[in-house]
Structures are given as C-alpha cells and as structure tokens.
Image (cartoon, helix red, strand yellow):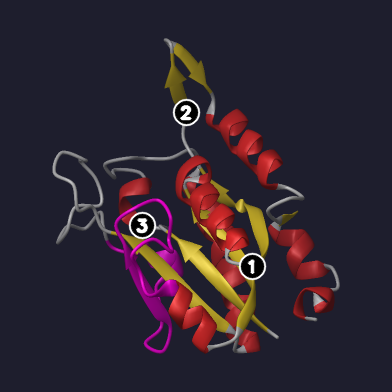
Amino acid sequence: MSIALMLIDIQNDYFPNGKMELNNPMKAAKNASEILDWFRTKKYEIYHIQHVSSRSGTGFFLPNTEGVKIHKSVLPLEQENIIVKHTPNSFLNTELLNKLKEKEVKKLVICGMMTHMCIDATVRAARDFGFECTVIEDACTTKDLIYLDRVVPAEQVHFGFISALNGMYATIYTTNEFLTQNTASLLM
C-alpha cells in the first residue's frame, strides 16, 4: 500500500502582498514544508496542487502572474508531480485520480490552503474515491468569512471545518504529532 502527500494551493496570492492573503499563511507553509521534507526523505509520492483561475473576475490565481506560482517554501522538485486545477476539488477535471491509481496510492496526507474551500472539497472527494485521508491541520489555513454581515474569524472557520472532517473523512494530526508519533501505522 502506498502513501502520498498532497500540498494544495500553497501559492503566492495567499501570502502577504498577495491578492487573497490568508490568516497566518507563513506558519501553515512552514509546517507544510516540514511535512514535505519528511516525505522527500522517505521518497514517497508528492503531489503539488496548483489552482489556476479559469474564470474572469476572480482577482487571484490569475494565469501568468506571480500570485499563481507555488510559494517558495514548498517549491516542487523536478521529479515531483504538479497537478493544475480550476475548481476547489483537486480531483475534478484533473489527472490526479489516474496518477494516484497508477502509483497504487491508498493513503493521502493533505496540507494546504484554504481549509474551508479546497481542503474540504478535496478531502471529501478523496474519501468518496476510497482514499484514507490524514489532514495536518496546522499545515492548513483559511480566512475570515462573512455571512449576513457577521464576521466568522478565520480560526473558527478553520477549526469548524477540521472538526467536521475529523473521523468520518479524515484523521487529523498537527505537524508535531505526525512527525514525532509512530507514523508506521499510517503506512500499513
């Protein structure tokens, strides 16, 4: 059974001076980088998911901009997979599912941005496809949301979605838990 890492949308527009700055993206990216280093050391499959906007008027992740580029903290190596997507769900209209099947991947470790959108959509889809998912919650982040003139702080949004995924859709770890606990159980 094979395991793979998915780094979802860790792209420049989500960082300071980007078009859609998130809550504390540097912390999430640092943690994602530590998970990435672990996967590289173990020589496991790695998939960088890059969102490129295909809708006019979105304002961020626009083609041929600095903002659409993968952040320097998790830059892909030449042999690592880059999957371009145009929707929150990393599987929708992409080659991701076929690539994972080719490599006989059964378990996914997921990090990235935004918790309430692309992480949530991708984890739920992955589970529907039969993958066992682990989400590294502190290697993910999101932003404040507004509904009916009420602001829901990013931290509440993040933990609300992480709590909803926990159990039925994914096992949740922090970076430290993943790196320091006996991760052999993940690989069986």
- The residue tagged 1 is 130
Q: Quadrant of the C terminus?
A: bottom right
Q: Secondary structure at mark 3?
A: loop
Q: Is residue 78 magenta?
A: yes
Q: Secondary structure at mark 1?
A: loop
Q: Nearer the viewer, residue 144 or 101?
A: 101
- Where residue 78 appears, as percent x and y from the top left, is 37, 87
Q: Residue furthest top?
A: 149
Q: Residue at x 19, y 53 (%)?
A: 54
- Where residue 79 appears, as percent x and y from the top left, is 41, 89
Circle 3 Cα neighbour tier, 10 Å, few/some/many (<14 / 14–19 / ≥20)? many
At label 1, which amino acid type do we have?
Gly
Up-down: is 169 above or below 46?
above
At label 3, which amino acid type do we have?
Gln
At label 2, which amino acid type do we have?
Asp
- The residue tagged 3 is 11
Q: Residue at x 50, y 50 (%)?
A: 121
Boundaries of the magenta span: 69-96
- The residue tagged 2 is 144
First along the sequence among labels 3 and 2: 3
How many labels were placed on the picture? 3
Can residue 188 be seen at all in this image of the molecule?
Answer: yes
Q: Quadrant of residue 128?
A: bottom right
Q: Nearer the viewer, residue 118 or 40?
A: 118
First along the sequence among labels 1 and 3: 3
Q: Quadrant of residue 187?
A: bottom right
